[in-house]
Image (tube, rainbow, N blue to C red):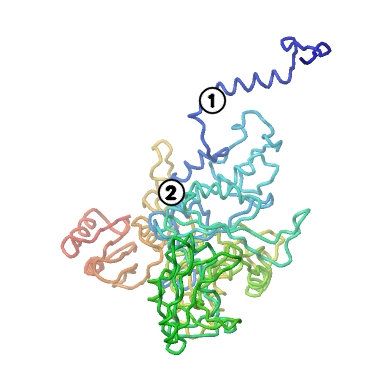
Amino acid sequence: MENTDNIERVDLEKVDWRSSREFFESLGEELDKLDDKDESYNFTWVGKRKSIIEAGTPINKTLRPDIDASKDFDNTKNMLIVGDNLDALKLLQESYLGKIKMIYIDPPYNTGHDFVYHDNFTIKKNDYEDSTTDSEGNKIISEDEFTENSKSNGRFHSDWLSMMYPRLKLARNLLCESGLIFISIDDNEQYNLKKLCDEVFGEENFVACFIIDKTAQGANQSDTFKTQHEYLFAYTRSDSSFVNSNKKAPIDKSKYKYEDKKGAYAITNSFDSINSPLSANKNRGYTIYYNEKTGDAITKDEYDKERNVFLDYDKSLLSQGYEPIRPGIRNGIQYPWNWMKSRFEEQYKEELVFQRNKLGKMAIYHKNRFNGIVKDTTIQKFDTRKSGNLLLSEMLGGKFFDYPKSVEMLKWILERTTETDGDVLDFFAGSGTTGHAVMDLNAEDGGNRKYILVQLDETTDEKSEAKKAGYDTIDQITAERLRRAGDKIIKEHPDLEGKLDTGFRVFRIDSENENTDIRKPLKDVSQIDLFNSIDNIKKDRTPLDFLFGVVYASALPFDLKLETKKIGDNTVYLYGYLDEDSGLVACFDNNISENTIKEIAKLKPLTAAFKDSSFQDSAAKINLSEQFRVIAPDTKVKVI
């Protein structure tokens, strides 16, 4: 028995480990508060609840057409919306719900030197109770302005997530079932963006994270390694079968030397398998007797499955000039053929090649056919400098925009959908690369894609080259780039002039057309208000403002053909009108003749629109209703 007389005994009851005691006491208290059923894996941040509410909060705004800033307004199907993209996404909900084929966005990367949109749901300092720093020691500030999102901001990541969540939520509503969204990002928020997209679009709808090699030189922002890449996340709305992951490749004549009625092929793989032994695939053990003169083959079951050996050759077939061929033996292991006997007998003449190997023995090989398709990889290289910076600078005559995306990258993204038509949305439009790429690709493949771009009317820096060149806001650069890109494409493809849509309609987000002063309580109404309240619509609005206000209220697309015609002294707008029971016909003149009303009614449009002040009294309004009741009873009449 071991002697323990010299071992000092410690009474644990008398030992007081203060730090350990406090730790276990606090741990016990926290564990007491927890219930396993309340624990779950989730992704959250300060302000998430308010950002969820913001996604569903309605707005009282409208889209006002800007004819002067547009190109071929009446006929084009492309759009540039100027204003906050959260408002734009809400204004697009009714007209484009489930209709967008592809979305691409290049949002602020949250580098600490770019802004985030500080929406009205941004969390204020009070929500942190009286703390002056967050859990990471960052100083908490309380500005809720449209400003640079500094890393000293304790809400640095939360502000970015709160900005992105409602926009992605609304964007998902716009995607069709087979639609895709692509989002560019870098290391600053790529982890958070992945979790955010998993929540909004669903983990099961994640397609890929592409690594975009953007420049051979690499950027010098890092203290350690140069950063040469960005990320591109791709998600589908619900159906990934529409993702085109293939690209056409030119045929390599040095490899695909042979050709038959099915096309070019190479002779590469042996017909016997080395993946598993014949003993594990006994139904693929047989002898092939081949006649080199006639090209015929006969199969014989000469494999003993019990003893795992081949039997003697058929001498009668040998005497007829047939040469026996059996699968190979390597390192003492007998391997099987790649196909079962029935498949071999059906396809050997079309899909297999018989030829002698280096030892002079007859061998069988597969025809490795060239189909012109190669699977794309998740690593893609695009020269951002050449197809981004230099291209834009050459088009505009100066460097007016930092870090524009590559046109070639956007064209590659557009090709990931199989169709050559459909609506494409970019609500962080920047310099307008997406619109440029849409027009360029349409010119190349005869496509009919349409773009919707959204760009904030952010002012340019007073000392910038853009400001000196006369660009007061970023959207002006966007519009000019689209205008010049269209002209450049037509110059390169003169046969497409008049056929390719290189125009765009500019809309500006503004307050609704209705005069809200008429809703004031009587005690707040002034004489000016009474004067302004004579008309229920704002005095600075044009007939086209009213027209597109009705378009929005009717949930019609904003890209239908617009035709303006005269009926008597009145100006009449035909929007998307093809024939009876289609489109919108409207007149917003101050005085509308009875003849004009009759002529509009005879067109029998789906909707007819007028303004209330066009009619002198109630009798005139009754006459309007009566005319449509008799002539066009199915037309919906709207009076604003």
Q: Quadrant of residue 262?
A: bottom left
Mark 1, other Cα within 10 Å: few <14 / some 14–19 / many ≥20: few
Which residue bears the numbered disc 1? Answer: 34
Count of numbered tags? 2
Q: Residue 503, position in %: x, y?
A: 48, 72
Q: Quadrant of residue 302?
A: bottom left
Residue at image coords 57%, 57%: 209
Q: Residue 429, position in %: x, y?
A: 55, 61
Q: Is residue 541 visible?
A: yes
Kind of element beneath mark 1:
loop
Q: Is residue 26 left or right of residue 84?
A: right
Q: Amino acid at mark 1?
A: Leu
Q: Quadrant of residue 12?
A: top right
Q: Do the numbered discs 2 and 1 sit on residues whose CB atoms are within 8 Å?
A: no
Quadrant containing the C terminus is: bottom left
Which residue bears the numbered disc 2? Answer: 60
Kind of element beneath mark 2:
loop
Sequence-wise, which precedes: disc 2 or disc 1?
Answer: 1
Q: Amino acid at mark 2?
A: Asn
Front-most of 200 and 512?
Answer: 200
